[in-house]
Amino acid sequence: MKFEFPYVIYQGVTMYLLLAIGWHGGEELATIHVASIGRIVGFIVLGFLLNFPIGFLAYMLLTRMTKMRRIDRATVAGYYGSDSAGTFATCVGVLATVGMAFNGFMPVMLAVMEMPGCLVALYLAARLRHRGMDALGNMPGEPSHKPPARVGPGAAGRPAPGQHLDTERELAIERETEIALELQEHPDNDADWDDAKRGVGTVKLLREVLLNPGLYLLFGGIVIGLVSRLQGPKVVHDNDTVFVAAFQGVLCLFLLEMGMTASRRLRDLKSAGPGFIVFGLLAPNLFATLGIITAHAYAHITHAQFKPGTYILFAVLCGAASYIAVPAVQRLAIPEASPTLPLAASLGLTFSYNVTIGIPIYIEISRAATQWFPIT
């Protein structure tokens, strides 16, 4: 009998982890000194901006290393320009196990750094559409590309195999006549209908980018933790049974589900080629190291006193790939792209690598960077 993790339980586990992460962050936010708010906001803005070049760098690497369609490269780049709440939660558990503290504003960083990848994917997809991408996502020069039919005065159309040019012209004229008659009967309704559809699509897209359920839960947890800590020890205590004691066990259930999902996604990598597999394992190391260097440089320039775990979490946010927020945006705005290849890389490769090998490596890289460039 095939073992299946109930989807309702997976939803509940995900909701709990996001709320718990937000709650911990909200508690710590209540203890932040007013004088350090400027440095914290600057660091959060830096994290938001850094994920844009990470997304574009991922696109460039995919162009060099794979033979994927350009629309699929753009979508995968968007996944890597975002972050992963699951990897973040796993890293929080690892840091708690090794006794490494982190600053309480990092859950806010998690929410903010999720958005750039969505915007990178949307920009690259729009650019490809302007350059002649067909309805199936194929660009000129790619296999199976179907250029739009040239219809109208002076159009040098080609007949399909087995058809004559006169037949093609007659069909084109007939289609144009039908469209013209429909526009004469409903001159305003069609334009209004198109505008309405575009408006509804834009609202849905903005909701997925800025107000998706993950962000609701994360920010909700932050507010709850912040208000709870401000109310004093009668509300918040270290032995909290809901958000502290149960966190490790729930995280284990989440990793079990993610492991099963990742193993199923590995089969999709067969169609992508070895270069795509190398990218899925190389990218987290490259982007996480970039994040560690950037965070240490910012701390040196601003003389910010970040806790050691903050550098690790920032590296994880830079080196992880989305599998929740960007797929939702892709479903709405980039239907031409493959839905399996990005998830195969983000879940099957990058997530699995980060939670098993990557996080310990990032801890050692951060320790080395701290020794080389000690903050005075």
Image (cartoon, rainbow, N blue to C red):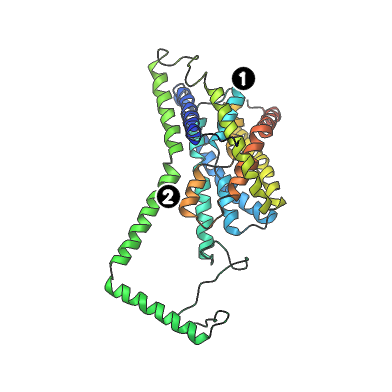
User: Residue 256 appears at what percent x and percent y?
Assistant: 59, 31
Residue 156 relative to residue 58: left or right: left
User: Residue 253 appears at what percent x and percent y?
Assistant: 56, 28
Which quadrant would the N terminus be assigned to in this image?
top right
Mark sitting earlier along the chain (1/2): 1
Identify whether 347 is placed above or below 107: below
Which quadrant would the C terminus be assigned to in this image?
top right
User: Do we see residue 188 in this rendering?
Assistant: yes
User: Residue 366 appears at what percent x and percent y?
Assistant: 66, 30
- Residue with the most extreme bottom position: 166
Residue type of the residue flagged with mark 2: Leu
- Identify the residue under disc 2: 205
What residue is shown at x 46% (from left), y 37% (from top)?
214
Mark 1 or mark 2: which is in front? 2
User: Do we see residue 304 in this rendering?
Assistant: no
Residue 153 relative to residue 313: left or right: left
